[in-house]
Image (tube, grey):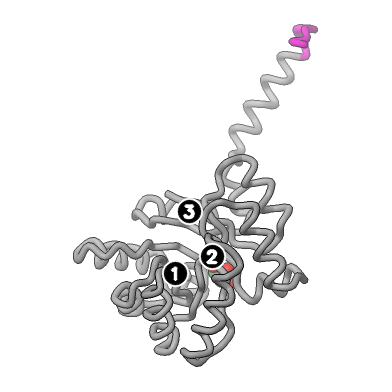
Amino acid sequence: MKFFVDTAEIDAIAELNDLGIVDGVTTNPSLIMKSGRNILEVTKEICDLVDGPVSAEVVATKAEDMIAEGRKLAGIADNIAVKVPLTWDGLKACKVLSGEGQMVNVTLCFSANQALLAAKVGATFISPFIGRLDDINIDGMDLIADIRTIYDNYGFDTQILAASIRSVNHITDAARIGADVITAPPGVIRKLAEHPLTDKGLAAFMADWEKTGQDIL
Ligand code: G3P
C-alpha cells in the first residue's frame, strides 16, 4: 500500500520523506490555507522534494475553468496530479485532463456510484473521504470496500486513495480491504509506530540495563 502525506507543511513532508515512507503528497485548498503559503510556490517545493504524485486542487467550479487551472497546476512539475471535485463539471475536466495524459485525482467522493463514474472518465485516483462519512454516522470503510469490489469486478485501474483519514485504525482497515493508497496527516502516520507495550518494554529494558553499569560506546 502506498502512503501519501496529507499536508502542505514542507518540514513534515521532508521528515517522513527522509525515512523513505512517502509515496506522494495530497493537498487541498484548506491545507494550502493552513500552510499560509502561495499555492504555486509551495506545490513546486513539494514536487522538488518528493518523487511520487503530488495532488494540487483546482478551485474553479466550471469544467473549462477547471481544465485551465489544471493545466497551469500541471505545468509546475511532471509529478503533479490535478485534483478535481466529484461534480459533473469535475468529471468533464477529468475526462479532458486524463485524455491529455495528465494524472487526475477525483476528490470529495462519498458514494460508490461517484467512484464508478470517476473510473469511467479515466481518473488516476479516486479519493473517498472516510472520516467525513464517519462524522455523519455512515461507515466510511464500507465505501472503501464497495469501491474495491466494483473496481475489481470490472478491472478498472483507477487507484483507490483512502482520504480523510483520522486514526491509525482507518489505515489498518483500509489496508485490510485493499485500498491502493492512503493519505493521512503526518501526525497519524507517526502514530503508526506507537504501542504502549513497546514503551513499557523499552522502559523495563532501560531499567535493567542501568543495573549492569555497562556502556556500548
Ligand atoms: O485528503 C482529504 C482530507 O484532507 C480531508 O480530511 O480530515 O478534513 O476530512 P478531513
Q: Examine the rendered structure and indicate whether residue 211 appears above or below residue 116.
A: above
Disc 3 target residue? 171
Query: What secondary structure do most residues of the magenta stretch adopt?
Result: loop
Q: Which residue matches tag 2?
A: 80
Magenta stretch bounds: 210-217
Residue displayed at 51% across by 73% down: 83
**Proximity of marks 2 and 1: CB atoms separated by less than 8 Å:** yes
Numbered circle sitting on residue 163 = none
Residue 31 in percent (x, y) is at: 66, 70
Q: Is the residue at mark 2 in contact range of ligand 1, meaning its CB lies under 8 Å from it? A: no
- The image position of residue 43, as x and y in percent, is 65, 65
**Dot 1 corresponds to which residue?**
102
Q: Look at label 2 and name its amino acid.
A: Ile
The mark lying in front, picked from 2 and 3, is 2
Q: Disc 3 marks which amino acid?
A: Ile
Residue 211 lies in quadrant: top right
Q: Residue 118: give x, y in percent of width and height.
A: 35, 76
